Amino acid sequence: DNQMLDGRTREDGTSCGFGGCRYSRPADRKDSFENWSPKLGLSYQMSGSKPRENSLLFVNIARGFRAPQATELYRLQRQQTSADLESVQLDSYEAGFRFQSGLLNYELAYYQMYKDNVIYRDSSYFNLSNGKTDHQGLEIRVDYAINNALNLSVNGSFAQHQYANDQLIAGVNINGNYVDTAPRHFGAAQLNWAITDALLVELEWLHQGSYYMDAENLHRYQGHDLINLRADWQLGPQWSVNVRINNVTDVAYAERADYTSFTEERYFPGMPLSLFLGVQWHGG
């Protein structure tokens, strides 16, 4: 329900300079979306002697969707007067293996995903929903109790995300290019050490792989590695102290990086070396 004047004018109906106002207000309209999201999962618990009895095979097939957001439908730019958008649809296929025992637990999964009706803004600043992307990857998770005091957890992802539709951006057809701001690999590892029943220390490593900052695949962020340290100390029945040191090596990194023709390379810096101290009291 548009409570203002339709089109690219100011609120009073006068025109903006430089060829018109940036945003266009569409006329009143009603949009509705109907989608279905089925899911099928199968698992097989292996039998026999150890380690087979601790092993599980699984397969998942699912469809998900996302209806267009209000800003995508109605916050239009330049000469676009309406946006006839479809719901974004994602078909996913996953197969994996899971093993669980007292000391060692791990899971390995391979997936493929196909996304249709991807909503994007073209070179004319029109909102469209005919984009496609393909995704495939391998995910791994391992938990290992080294002994009664030490525990190691590792997880990682190795993936490939690509555009699968013909679309020209700055004269470049991005079909087959890697999806911008989507790293191909990332992971983490945590080593927990229970020094005593009251004192727990955790050393953490975080890895962020490189990725392209633009759909044309011309500018790349190199990724980063971070080290964090945490400690929890139970002083008694009611008091506890926790210490957290983030980015121990004080690495300069970006939480997110992208590239636009207006700003060129743009970085959103992450936190430098930071120390946090907390004291908790539990009433009883």
Image: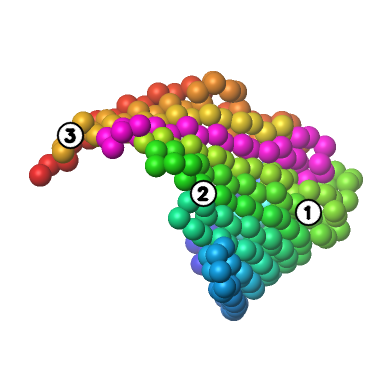
The residue segment tinted magenta is 195-220
- Circle nearer the N terminus (1, 3): 1
Instruction: Name the residue rendered at 60%, 23% in the picture.
Output: 252
Residue wearing tag 3: 236
Numbered tag placed on residue 162 in the rendering: 1
Q: Identify the element where label 1 is drawn.
A: strand
Q: Is residue 250 magenta?
A: no
Q: Position of residue 60 (x, y in %)?
A: 62, 71
Quarter of the view holding residue 193 = top left
Instruction: Name the residue rendered at 58%, 57% in the picture.
Output: 107
In the displayed orientation, state which residue is furthest to the front. Answer: 49
Callout count? 3
Q: Position of residue 149 (x, y in %)?
A: 39, 38
Instruction: Name the residue rendered at 74%, 53% in the picture.
Output: 161
Numbered tag placed on residue 181 in the rendering: none
Q: Name the front one of labels 1 and 3.
A: 3
Instruction: Name the residue rendered at 57%, 63% in the picture.
Output: 51
Residue wearing tag 2: 143
Q: Position of residue 272 (x, y in %)?
A: 51, 23
Say which of 70 and 57 sits in front: 57
Are there few (<14), some (14-19), or many (20+) residues within 10 Å of tag 2? some
Residue 142 vertical position relative to residue 6 in the rendered view, above or below: above
- Circle nearer the N terminus (3, 2): 2
Are there few (<14), some (14-19), or many (20+) residues within 10 Å of tag 1? many
- Circle nearer the N terminus (1, 2): 2
In screen coordinates, is 14 left or right of 168?
Answer: left
Q: Identify the element where label 3 is drawn.
A: loop
